Amino acid sequence: MSATITGLRSRLTSYGDDEFSLFLRKAFIKGAGYTDDALDRSIIGIVDTSSEFNPCHGNVPALIEAVKRGVLLAGALPIAFPTISLHESFAYPTSMFLRNLMAMDTEELINAQPVDAVVLVGGCDKTVPAQLMACLSANIPAIQLVTGPMLTGSYNGVRVGACTDCRRLWAQYRAGELDIEDLARANDELVPGVGTCGVMGTASTMACLTEALGIMPLGSATPPAVSAARVRVAERAGQLAVHAAKEKITPAQVITRESLENAVTVLHAIGGSTNAIVHLLAIAGRMSNVQPEFRLDDIDAIGRKTPLLVDLKPSGAAYMEDFHRAGGMPVLLKELAPLLHLNVRTITGRTLGEELDALPPPFPQQIVRPLKDPLFPASALVVLRGNLAPDGAVLKQSAATPALLKHTGPAVVFSSPFDMAKRIDADELDVSPDSVLVLLNIGPVGNPGMPEAGLIPIPKKLAARGVKDMVRISDGRMSGTAQGTVVLHVAPEAAVGGPLAIVRDGDLVQLDVNARSIELLLPPEEIERRLEAWKTQQPKKKRERGYRGLYKRTVMQSDSGADFDFLRANYEGAEGPGE
């Protein structure tokens, strides 16, 4: 973007005559009723991700109106435009499959239109990562505005909320503890209104991390979707977008290595979703100003010195509305201040330290624990390595069963989600509570789209005996709302010939979280022999068309954020004609 050309004159459509391009542009936009006075102002774009398939974004129209009010109060012109909308339950095969497409769509529309800054409105799991990836690549002034968490419902007098309670109740139904009528009644209460999941799942995690990154003002992550506070946050976002445009505060100035480290500190302190690890690595890959490269091991290292402080499901007991009433992210950041880089710049233009110094004094509350009295001592999330995961795997230790954190057991292998669905509840399945359930081919390439199928269900015959948890391993993901001793994001994945591909029923698998180790207990020569045999057995791949083909050809592994290789800041692809 030019330093001097702003507003309607920027990014003119190419007709070979810039003055004619501007004349034509003004003629068409005046068809919407704008005056010359309005069109002479700075333009703030507002990314609209509303969809009738997306209840998490059901409040987006109201938020956009509030953003517009803030923009107008600051003297600029707001113009909203739509992009792709992704909802977890309404995206086939997965929303993760479409995250990179949404990032591309958002980046290109930001670059294509005459906007001096943008407000990115979104909330559901893959939306915020996609928007952050896009704004870093476009690198024009941008502010994130999340839709906010939903409120809780009530089932049989007990508070419930999406989606940790969805999984708990479904597990009870599978174990025969709930009948179908009870399940149906619960289904009416789990999502009582619009907004994102009301626990520390991926949406809430990404909202909190975005506030920690500094590209969203303090106090923005937790106000409920249906609250007046959420609307006020939207109005302020509009005003700050105008300020960011005037001061030319770009995402690259705000999201730095230091602010990424702050976000990872918060990730551990909230017991956040393992999905956030993939997203943070993808975001880091869009940054040309991160040296040295931000890697999985950085996430583990920060975790070793960071305690879990926030008592929210699935690692704790409360809900996002409780976190908000306890003061939300500002209270947590104040508590974490000794572990944070306080000199990082935020979207307001002030440093994080200056923002925290301006906060009112703390008040008594039970949700955010003090550093000296944590909910969990450190490493809520861990990075594992070993011959089964040479490039890494992750586990949410704070939501696991402590007795299973050091465990050796025989593998029960499922070759795909379809194989698992067919056999997991079969009476003849050779499985015991000590078994290690292994699911293959649900990584970035294998499914494709890395589905949230890593929370392999407990076989029904074991669930009926009261078994609540087992060690489970896959190259896929798990919902941030889920609990269990589940190893995820194994890299390289099975579909590209990672060691996971050659695990067989009965092979001993050893998990040792303290040692950060995940090992297949076979001699190295046997592993090598099986990997060579696997390669010779692979059928010749057909070249696929369309987005699916592009995805499979260019998606990276989970340890690189599962972004497309050509979208990363350091991409050095082969040059084509005209490049």
Image (tube, helix red, strand yellow):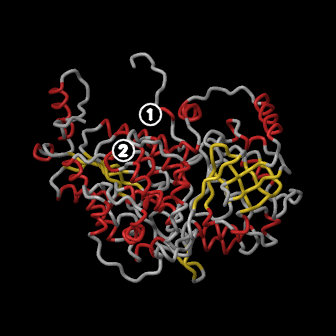
Asked if the residues shown at circle 2 and circle 1 are in contact, with their CB atoms under 8 angstroms apart, the answer is no
Vertical placement of 512 versus 335: above or below?
Answer: above
User: Residue 549 sits in which quadrant?
Assistant: top right
Tell which residue pokes out farthest to the left in this image.
37
Judging depth in this view, the residue of 276 and 461 nearest the camera is: 276
Residue 304, image x, y percentages: 55, 61
Residue 484, image x, y percentages: 67, 64
Q: Earlier in the sequence, mark 2 or mark 1?
A: 2
Q: Residues within 10 Å of mark 1 (few under 14, many from 20)?
A: few
Could you say whether the residue bearing mark 1 is in a helix, strand or loop? Answer: loop
Query: Real-space Cα distance between discs 2 and 1?
Result: 16 Å
Amino acid type, mark 1? Asn
Vertical placement of 576 versus 65: above or below?
Answer: above
Tell which residue pokes out farthest to the top in this image.
577
Which of pointers 2 and 1 indicates the residue nearer the eye? 1
Residue ID at (15%, 31%): 23
Judging depth in this view, the residue of 233 and 267 nearest the camera is: 267
Amino acid type, mark 2? Cys
Residue ID at (78%, 33%): 534
Would residue 369 be found to the left or right of residue 489 on screen? Answer: left
- To which residue does mark 1 refer? 570
Q: Which mark is residue 135?
A: 2
Residue ID at (29%, 42%): 140
Could you say whether the residue bearing mark 2 is in a helix, strand or loop? Answer: helix
Would residue 309 be found to the left or right of residue 467 on screen? Answer: left
The C terminus, quarter of image:
top left
Can residue 88 be seen here? The reply is no
